Image: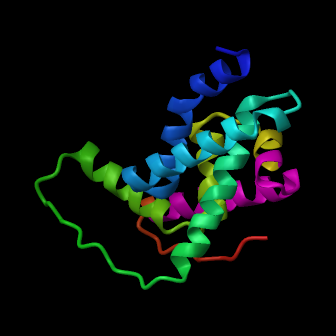
Amino acid sequence: MSAFRQSVEAMIPALRRYARALTRDADAADDLVQDTLVRALRSERLFLGGDVRSWLYTILTNLNKNRRRSLARRPQFMQLTENNPDASGTEAEGRDIEKALATLVEEQRSVLLLVMLEGMSYREVADIQGVPIGTVMSRLARARAHVKASLEGERPALRRVK
């Protein structure tokens, strides 16, 4: 197996983790990761070296944008959620965090997940998303403020991103 393919294979768990956090749907995330891997392996000859990790995250991010555009054209159905008053504190906190993340606009959520969940630098996220580093910093600050306000019981203001 080539070094490129080994690098791609080593990234699968991280790609799955990011895709699941991004889509909030295990099946959609697995499809997104599979599409990313297929595209990367088909385009191996186009990879000119450098950071395989950033390249794969860029592919996944672009595929997710395309998926979201496609979903925007379809009717939306609200999922019924269970309110379990007997849930433990940790479980309830997890739901609160999940709800706060769900209310973020896509660009802010993806920046927050790449920095906080995947431990990427601002420069890496800027390269992946194709935006200036200042935009990444702004999106991250707004996402953090939004999540904090949500967790503190305040109603966070929804803002559009750059």
Horizontal arrangement in the rendering, residue 2 relative to residue 47 (left or right): left
Quadrant in which the N terminus is drawn:
top right
The quadrant where residue 135 appears: bottom right
Main secondary structure of the magenta stretch: helix
Figure coloring = rainbow
Image location (x, y in percent) of residue 162 = 79, 70
Q: Quadrant of residue 8?
A: top right
Is the residue 51 above or below the residue 161 in the image?
A: above
In this rendering, does residue 111 appear at all? no
- Does the rendering let one see residue 77? yes
Q: Identify the residue shown where x is 53% and y is 44%.
A: 33
Residue at 83 percent of width and 55 percent of height = 130
Quadrant of residue 12 within the rendered picture: top right
> Image height check: is 118 above or below 145?
above
Q: Based on the picture, tell me whether residue 132 belongs to the magenta stretch.
A: yes
Q: Position of residue 36 (x, y in %)?
A: 61, 45
Q: Which residues are magenta?
A: 127-150
Q: Which residue ends up furthest to the left in the rendered image?
A: 86
Residue 87 in percent (x, y) is at: 16, 51
Residue shown at 69% from the left, 57% from the top: 62
As drawn, is 113 to the left or to the right of 51?
A: left
Judge by depth and name the residue closer to the eye, 103 or 149: 103
In this rendered view, identify the residue nearer to me: 3 or 144. Answer: 3
Task: Specify whether 27 is left or right of 150.
Answer: left
